[in-house]
Image (cartoon, grey):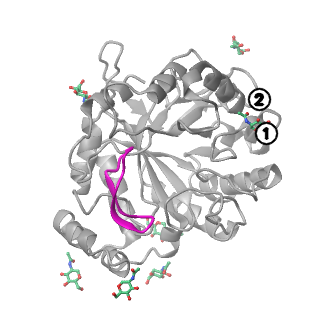
Amino acid sequence: MMFRVFVVKFLFLTNIYSYELPFSTLGNSIIDANGAVVRMRCVNWPGSMETLMPEGLQHNSIDNIVLIIKQMNMTCVRLTYSIDVTRSSNLTVYQSLSRLNLTFALQGFMNNNPSLINSTVSNLFDTVLDTLGKYNILVLFDNHVSKAMWCCSDFDGNGFWGDRYFDVEQWIDGLKFMANKTIDRPYVIAMSLRNELRGVRQNQPDWYHNVVRGILEAISFVNPRLLIVISGLNYDLNLSFIRSLPVQNLVPISIRKKIVYEAHWYSWSYYGLLSDCNHVKVSIENAWGFILESNYSYTAPVWLTEFGTNVDQFQGDDEFIDCVKGFLQTPLTQTMSWSYWVLAGSYYIRSGTAESHESFGLLTDDWKNIKSKAFINILLTL
Ligand SMILES: *[C@@H]1O[C@H](CO)[C@@H](O)[C@H](O)[C@H]1NC(C)=O
Ligand SMILES: *[C@@H]1O[C@H](CO)[C@@H](O)[C@H](O)[C@H]1NC(C)=O
Ligand SMILES: *[C@@H]1O[C@H](CO)[C@@H](O)[C@H](O)[C@H]1NC(C)=O
Ligand SMILES: *[C@@H]1O[C@H](CO)[C@@H](O)[C@H](O)[C@H]1NC(C)=O
Ligand SMILES: *[C@@H]1O[C@H](CO)[C@@H](O)[C@H](O)[C@H]1NC(C)=O
Ligand SMILES: *[C@@H]1O[C@H](CO)[C@@H](O)[C@H](O)[C@H]1NC(C)=O
Ligand SMILES: *[C@@H]1O[C@H](CO)[C@@H](O)[C@H](O)[C@H]1NC(C)=O
């Protein structure tokens, strides 16, 4: 299946080329069906909070939002969803916004996406996926939480299998429900098992057990062409334990070339003080950077699926982004895909506040403009 993605390569001559689907892995890189290395530059589009809907649609049409993503020269979106949406999939947009008393969002949605107001929340995800595909944007479909809400804390009941809201069987069923959506959408190239595993219940035996279940019973089972993106422990900051037992050893050979690990990085992550970027890089090497080293049984791509900073305060230079940039430009890391947190804008509702502002967002609150073109230009040099 041929699918063209036009990639503008900065730092080098401007090139236009296309990728052939599906993707798989070779060493520490994601490659296309012809063996060409694929480095995706993505933005997170949240859709895992209380409304059960992708954010921003009260402010702008789906087409316009995707066009802005194109304008930003991003090649991919990490689209987040909750397991709750797979269990209330027949709820309509109208019902969802009404039951939360989000009257501003309801009116705005009717103005900006009028034809979708009676669509179910599940079909709304279908339309967002279809529109991303229409504009040649690749998608990593991310199970962010079980109970739809802002993520993440140690005590939100969403952190690890067996937590109050994180039922294992509901999770398997939810992954299958969403994996089904990827079958006829080849531009959805990857699904994650679960974002930011964490909390007092986290432990390695359950991690291995459920990671393998999610792969064999849900993602690979429904759609074997997908890359499978796997989070470590401690909020996706630590995969050090896979050095002695890589997931690749626990799955059939046909699946090994679909295994991609993911990692997160914020200024407050425990890798160390930003003022000592070299020390941070050493911590990251021990926590997950080692996975990129060639020819080990654990060698695989690592996708930096979240990193972000306060764009409101950006004035041409950001210590955190500088450190990330240095990290991403070494021989080992130069093919790493990344995904900036976050596209929003503002949220329908976040932690009880309607029309909540997002300081890390690439878009203005009204989802119509790029907040800082200078910031986007720096991102595109990563
Ligand atoms: C995206 O790439 C095009 C073509 O190189 C360029 O003209 C445009 O300024 C870029 N957009 C941003 C936001 O950097
Ligand atoms: C959604 O509706 C269909 C058809 O009415 C029904 O078969 C299905 O069980 C419903 N799903 C949920 C999650 O309620
Ligand atoms: C919505 O408003 C109704 C009537 O004012 C109230 O009973 C209900 O608790 C509100 N629901 C939420 C989720 O705020
Ligand atoms: C949505 O449903 C309402 C009530 O059933 C109806 O009046 C309205 O025309 C519908 N809108 C669309 C766009 O289907
Ligand atoms: C899978 O998706 C198809 C439509 O693409 C739908 O008809 C079918 O019911 C779905 N199956 C499940 C298990 O969700
Ligand atoms: C990661 O986890 C391991 C063992 O579980 C621990 O020894 C280590 O300190 C943690 N942090 C880093 C940065 O590796
Ligand atoms: C990895 O192994 C291959 C095949 O044995 C070899 O050609 C290559 O040089 C090795 N790479 C490194 C970095 O050791």
Is there CB contact under 8 Å for labels 1 and 2? yes
Q: Is residue 353 magenta?
A: yes
Residue 297 marker = 2
- In the drawing, does residue 337 fall left or right of residue 137? right
Q: Is residue 150 magenta?
A: no
| Whole-percent x, y for residue 173 in the image | 61, 68
| Residue at left offset 64%, top offset 37% | 270
Q: Quadrant of residue 161?
A: bottom right
Residue visible at 19% across and 63% down? Answer: 112
- The span shown in magenta is 343-360
Check disc 1: other Cα within 10 Å, few if <14, some if 14-19, many if 20+.
few
Is ligand 7 within 8 Å of the beta carbon of the residue shown at mark 2?
Answer: no
Residue 37 seen in the current view: no
Judge whether 108 appears above or below 130 on screen: below
Q: Splitting the image into 4 quarters, where does residue 262 fall?
A: top right
In this image, 268 relative to 294: left or right?
left
Q: Is residue 31 visible?
A: yes
Q: Which residue is mark 1?
A: 249
| Front position in the image: 358 or 297 | 358
Residue at screen point 25% across, 43% down: 68
Q: Position of residue 82 (x, y in %)?
A: 51, 63
Q: Quadrant of the N terminus?
A: top left
First in residue order: circle 1 vs circle 2 = 1
Indicate the quadrant of ligand 3 in the picture. bottom left
The percent position of residue 134, horizontal first and vertical second, equals 29, 47
In the image, residue 322 sits, relative to residue 188, either above or below, namely above
The quadrant where residue 118 appears:
bottom left
Q: Secondary structure at mark 2?
A: loop
Residue 260 appears left or right of 366: right
Q: Which residue is drawn at the image coordinates 58% and 51% (left, top)? A: 195
